[in-house]
Image (cartoon, rainbow, N blue to C red):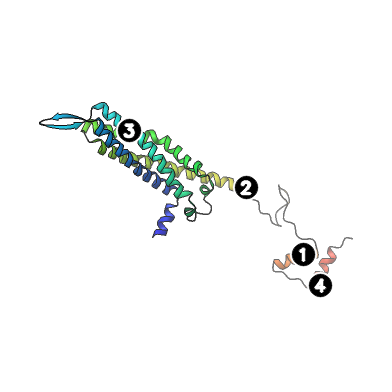
Amino acid sequence: MWIRLRGLYSRRVVNVNVNIVAAGLLALIPTLLAVHFVEIWLAHETRVGHELKLRLAPYHKVVISVVTFCVDVCSDVCFYYALHFMANHWPKALKYKPQDDERTKVPFFKDATLVQFQRMILSPLLYTLWIGTQQVLMQGFDVPSVWATAIGCFFAVAVVRTVHTVWMVKAAKKALAHGGKLLHGLAPKVWSDSQPTGGDAPPQQRPTSPAADHAHDAGNGKTKSPESATASRRGHVSP
């Protein structure tokens, strides 16, 4: 069971998604801690009925969103680089990779940065959904900032992971089709004795010496009688 899961995890489209989700969840820990401490620092007592409660002013909730963005970006990038190295470039992980996996031959930072570049393109969608959901919950429904941050994160990650997965699958299919054309164009042509000599390569030549002729026929499963061998040798004598 573990070997099957490890083999499935070695597939790039799988481990990239798993690593991004794992990095996001790990980065959520310092993000929520930062949001919690900033909320305590900025909150002020407000009388609600007969009770005093800690509340955030509307502009303080905007500060919460700024802190969320900054801490998450820094934490997420660090966690993802570590997880990507363990999944795709760590020597112990390479034995589970297919032998023809070209990604194992790409330098670590170049490979990981390519994924980060794709994520950077999608980051406006991620943080628009995340911060937007967070603000709606805090401003409109008075949800505590920690819960609003967590709910916004889960919603945004679910949407963006779906979009990124579709993107990676299409990119992989395109790269495979492009590679197949290259391989087809570079494949050597196979010639036989029955093909004409015209073209960009000559047909395979038959051996001209008696010894090579005998070896050629022996390799093809043919045996010659002494008479035919003598006639063959005579045929190679120049007039």
Question: Callout 2, which amino acid?
Answer: Leu
In the rendered structure, which disc, 2 or 3, sits on the residue that comes first in sequence? Answer: 3
Q: Which residue is disc 3 drawn over?
A: 67
Q: Check whether the beta carbons of the residues at disc 4 and disc 2 lie within 8 A of each other.
A: no
How far apart in space, not on screen, are marks 1 and 3 (Cα)? 83 Å
Number of other residues with Cα within 10 Å of mark 3, as a class: few under 14, some 14 to 19, many 20 or more: some
* Alpha-carbon span between mark 4 and mark 2: 46 Å
Q: Which of marks 4 and 2 is in front?
A: 2
**Decide: marks 1, 3 in contact (CB < 8 A)?**
no
Along the polypeptide, which appears first: circle 1 or circle 2? 2
Amino acid type shown at disc 4? Glu
Q: Residues within 10 Å of mark 1 (few under 14, many from 20)?
A: some
Which quadrant of the figure contains the N terminus? bottom left
Q: Which one is closest to the eye, mark 1 or mark 3?
A: 3
Amino acid bearing label 1: Asp
- Discs 1/2, front: 2
Q: Looking at the rendered structure, which numbered label has been put on residue 213?
A: 1
Location of residue 135 (image quadrant) = top left
* Helix, strand or loop at mark 3: helix
Query: Where is mark 4, residue-wise?
Result: 227
Q: Residue at x 47, y 40 (%)?
A: 113
Give how far across and how far down residue 220 sits, in percent.
69, 66
Indicate the secondary structure of the residue bearing disc 1.
helix
Q: 178 or 80, which is in the foreground?
A: 80
Tell me which residue sits at (42%, 48%) in the image: 15
Q: Residue 186 — which label?
A: 2
Distance from Cα at disc 1 to Cα at disc 2: 32 Å
